[in-house]
């Protein structure tokens, strides 16, 4: 591992992110479940699905990363790598699509308030969540099937070149088959494009609807503008790991190409320190997202904060 003196600091960072993610998500979920007024609302049903995805991502990624850092070596290849590969893809796809559905739900609530209760029912929301998870898990399972069928089956090294068996590290480890990489990138690009279009449409219509509401009063709608900018910033935070991924892919590939064939075969040497830095940055961002989601999409709600204060007063009493 390059920069080994930084390993203790990285262990502390990942341990803090893990603990904060677990506490924030479980606390938000407990508040929603304890309140009879919120547990059936569509946006909080979506929020519970997002919390489940974040918790699954945290408990799958964080312990493996901390263990690898504590051992001062990269991730050992085994059955758990395949599990990380499927769960990682499923949770990332489900989080992105769930947040997109939450934006569409808010659009219907703001722009079609009279038809909202008839259109967005609890049963329909649950069906949408089931479809989201079926789609996300299917992406992960199909990708793994392509890795197993197209990747090499013999002379596989015992240790990978990453702290986590994320898709590109996993595919590189089994001989870099093109089929799973192409499928994953095409599916991811199409999903990302549809989600971005849905976000842009929803927030543009909500902002225009709010702006038209204050035109007769000659008031500047700064609140709506701040809200739209805030959620656009949170969407950028969701996509930041993808941007880091694009940059790290090129550096990992360049670093591996520079290695001798023998070093590349038994993974005794790794890519450059710069590529390793991008790899660690990606892992940090993957754990930052589950820490922020419950605060942004859960505790930021005024109603949920009031319910939380009421619950705390009841506990103190």
Image (tube, rainbow, N blue to C red):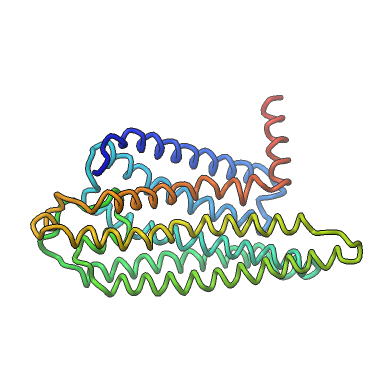
Q: Residue at x 38, y 71 (%)?
A: 185
Camera-nearest residue between 57 and 74: 74
Residue 83's spot in the image, x, y percent?
A: 31, 55
* Residue sitting nearer the eye, 147 or 264: 264
Q: Quadrant of the N terminus?
A: top left
Report whether 268 appears left or right of 242: left
Viewer-side residue, 232 vs 143: 232
Q: Is 245 displayed left or right of 43 in the figure?
A: left
User: Picture coordinates of residue 70 (x, y %)?
Assistant: 27, 36
> x%, y% of residue 134?
46, 67
- Asked if 248 appears above or below 197 in the picture, the reply is above
In the displayed image of the protein, which residue is found farthest to the right?
Answer: 217
Q: Position of residue 287 (x, y in %)?
A: 44, 47
Residue drawn at x 66%, y 46% as measured from the top left: 300
Q: Quadrant of residue 146?
A: bottom left
- Judged from this view, the residue extending furthest toward the left is 262
State the image quarter where residue 236 is shown: bottom right
- Residue plotted at (63% across, 42% down): 31
Question: Residue at 86% across / 63% down in the picture?
Answer: 214
In this view, 80 is above or below 90: above
Residue 290 falls left or right of residue 213: left
In the image, 177 versus 252, the foreground residue is 252
Number of residue marks:
0
């Amino acid at each position: 591992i390059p920069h080994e003196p930084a390993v203790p600091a990285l262990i502390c960072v990942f341990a803090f992110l893990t603990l904060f993610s677990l506490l924030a998500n479980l606390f938000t979920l407990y508040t929603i479940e304890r309140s009879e007024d919120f547990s059936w609302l569509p946006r909080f049903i979506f929020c519970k699905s997002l919390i489940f995805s974040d918790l699954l991502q945290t408990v799958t990624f964080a312990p493996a990363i901390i263990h690898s850092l504590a051992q001062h070596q990269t991730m050992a290849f085994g059955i758990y790598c395949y599990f990380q590969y499927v769960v990682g893809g499923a949770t990332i796809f489900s989080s992105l699509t769930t947040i997109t559905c939450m934006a569409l739900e808010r659009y219907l609530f703001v722009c079609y308030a009279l038809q909202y209760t008839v259109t967005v029912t609890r049963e329909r929301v649950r069906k949408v969540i089931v479809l989201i998870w079926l789609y996300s898990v299917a992406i992960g399972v199909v990708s793994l099937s392509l890795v197993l069928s197209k990747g090499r089956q013999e002379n596989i090294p015992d240790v990978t070149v990453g702290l986590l068996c994320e898709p590109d590290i996993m595919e590189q480890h089994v001989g870099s088959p093109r089929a799973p990489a192409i499928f994953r990138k095409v599916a991811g690009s199409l999903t990302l494009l549809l989600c971005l279009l849905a976000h842009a449409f929803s927030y543009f219509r909500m902002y225009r609807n709010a702006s038209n509401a204050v035109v007769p009063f000659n008031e500047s709608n700064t609140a709506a503008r701040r809200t739209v900018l805030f959620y656009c910033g949170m969407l950028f935070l969701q996509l930041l790991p993808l941007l880091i991924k694009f940059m790290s892919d090129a550096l990992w590939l360049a670093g591996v190409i520079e290695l001798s064939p023998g070093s590349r075969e038994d993974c005794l040497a790794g890519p450059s320190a710069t590529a390793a830095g991008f790899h660690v940055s990606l892992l940090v961002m993957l754990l930052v997202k589950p820490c922020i989601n419950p605060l942004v999409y859960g505790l930021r709600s005024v109603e949920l904060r009031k319910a939380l204060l009421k619950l705390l007063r009841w506990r103190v009493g």
